[in-house]
Image (cartoon, rainbow, N blue to C red):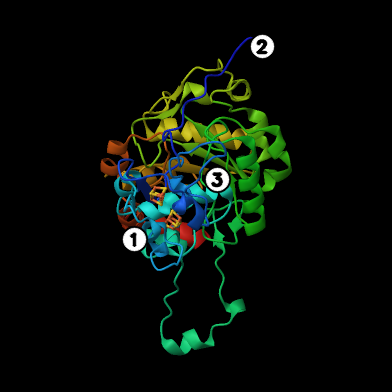
């Protein structure tokens, strides 16, 4: 392992993505230097010892909001050599859900820690989506009577008999494996989960020792590749999650690119550094509810105190999968809608295969009700 060298993948975008592109027409420009003098953001620069003005550093430009400023370079250029417009990258990225502003804002904040000015990067076209929670009160009188103490967002995770675990907020940190993210990210997620009174999941790929201090808020995952799965780590946690599929790419398994399989990641996954790792679909030992039950029983045998969660994606028969999980003895039926995923999921899979979670939840809910299961789960709660 010592003579191994990792080849890092080049950035997907060779230049930083920026919203505004500043263009200088070299046929018109006479390198007078006025623009370098007026722009307070350093977009134009004449390097010491050079007669020519350097290529504009577009990502520093504040964009069209500059138009009414006294230092607007376009107005100052008497040769009309400058133009300021939306960049090609900016115009081509994004879709209805992940708008260009959302992508750009997230990118910028990841690099600098500083959010873009304004609010548009925060909510996209969803108008908030799941980022905001609204409460529907039966009538206005009750709403007025609500106090902070009167609202609880706590959720019981197990409605069967047995161990009770609840989370203080109605969300948890979905699985992100060691390899897809590094240790610092995993530690940050664990700290955030503990602070919020919820859980976060290791994803497939092992449970680094450095997370031991956070065992009480960690979920460890057993996925189809069984990477990094050990009885020791299963014993450490309160919740064990079986991952049958990811919402963004049901039926396609998992894939960790070879460049991400560093010596540390490879060691944790008992694999060879630099080699792409594939998690198959499905579990090769599970083709029926009975097989599934053996899996669930295996975890209960290793850690009788843990509750078992079963994560499935949302094909059209997701309701059958949820019922099967119930009869196999799972405590949590975890439904991962089509948005649930992963940068490694092919675009065509993300957008076309499984059902959005908004459709899947009512479908599963109704089916469980018809089967009498929802009644039993609630009855036991
Ligand atoms: S002000 Fe116009 S002409 Fe002068 S250096 Fe800038 S772009 Fe060129
Ligand atoms: S538009 Fe404003 S910020 Fe952008 S390069 Fe010109 S002067 Fe600088």
Above or below 153: residue 293: above
Say which of marks 2 and 3 sits in front: 3
The residue under the point 48% across, 86% down is 142
Q: Which residue is at the front of the view, 224 or 83?
A: 83
- Residue 111: mark: 3
Looking at the image, how many numbered discs can be counted on the residues?
3
Question: Would you identify the image quadrant in which residue 181 lies?
Answer: top right
Q: Residue furthest bottom?
A: 141
Label 3–label 1 contact, CB within 8 A: no
Residue that extends furthest to the right in the rendered view of this protein: 213
Q: Position of residue 162 (x, y in %)?
A: 59, 51
Q: Earlier in the sequence, mark 3 or mark 1?
A: 3
**Which structural element holds mark 1?**
helix
Nearer to us in this view, 333 or 274: 274
Q: Would residue 124 be seen by someone viewing this image from the given angle?
A: yes
Report the Cα–Cα distance between label 2 and label 1: 49 Å
Name the residue: 74% across, 43% down.
213
Q: Which mark is residue 125?
A: 1
Distance from Cα at disc 3 to Cα at disc 1 = 24 Å
Q: Residue at x 37, y 65 (%)?
A: 127
The residue under label 2 is 2
Residue 231 appears at what percent x and percent y? 64, 29
Q: Are marks 2 and 1 in contact (CB under 8 Å)?
A: no
Residue 261: x and y, percent? 54, 23
Do we see residue 304 in this rendering?
no
Marker disc for residue 278: none
Q: Residue furthest top?
A: 3
Q: Earlier in the sequence, mark 2 or mark 1?
A: 2
* Left or right position of 10 against 210: left
């Amino acid at each position: 392992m010592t003579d191994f060298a990792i080849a890092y993948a080049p950035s997907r975008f060779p230049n930083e993505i920026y919203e505004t592109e500043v263009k200088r027409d070299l046929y018109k420009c006479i390198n007078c230097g006025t623009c370098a003098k007026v722009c307070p953001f350093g977009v134009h620069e004449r390097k010491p010892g050079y007669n020519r003005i350097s290529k504009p550093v577009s990502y520093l430009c504040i964009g069209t909001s500059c138009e009414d400023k006294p230092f607007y370079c376009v107005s100052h250029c008497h040769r009309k050599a400058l133009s300021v417009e939306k960049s090609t990258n900016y115009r081509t990225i994004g879709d209805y859900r992940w708008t260009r502003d959302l992508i750009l804002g997230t990118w910028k904040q990841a690099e600098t820690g500083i959010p873009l000015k304004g609010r548009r990067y925060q909510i996209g076209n969803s108008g908030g989506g799941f980022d905001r929670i609204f409460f529907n009160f039966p009538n206005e009188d009750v709403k007025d009577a609500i106090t902070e103490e009167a609202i609880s967002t706590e959720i019981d995770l197990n409605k069967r008999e047995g161990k009770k675990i609840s989370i203080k907020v109605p969300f948890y940190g979905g699985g992100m494996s060691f390899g897809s993210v590094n240790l610092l990210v995993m530690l940050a997620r664990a700290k955030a989960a503990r602070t919020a009174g919820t859980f976060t999941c290791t994803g497939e790929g092992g449970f680094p020792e450095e997370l031991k201090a956070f065992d009480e808020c960690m979920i460890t995952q057993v996925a189809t590749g069984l990477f990094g799965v050990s009885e020791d780590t299963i014993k450490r946690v309160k919740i064990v999650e079986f991952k049958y599929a990811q919402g963004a790419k049901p039926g396609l398994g998992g894939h960790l690119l070879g460049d991400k399989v560093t010596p540390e990641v490879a060691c944790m996954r008992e694999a060879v550094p630099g080699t792409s790792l594939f998690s198959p679909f499905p579990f090769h030992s599970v083709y029926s509810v009975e097989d599934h039950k053996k899996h669930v029983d295996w975890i209960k045998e290793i850690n009788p105190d843990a509750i078992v969660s079963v994560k499935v994606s949302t094909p059209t028969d997701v309701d059958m999968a949820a019922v099967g999980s119930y009869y196999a003895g799972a405590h949590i039926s975890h439904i991962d809608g089509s948005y649930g995923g992963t940068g490694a999921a092919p675009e065509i899979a993300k957008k076309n295969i499984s059902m959005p979670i908004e459709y899947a939840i009512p479908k599963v809910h109704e089916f469980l009700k018809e089967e009498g299961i929802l009644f039993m789960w609630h009855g036991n709660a």
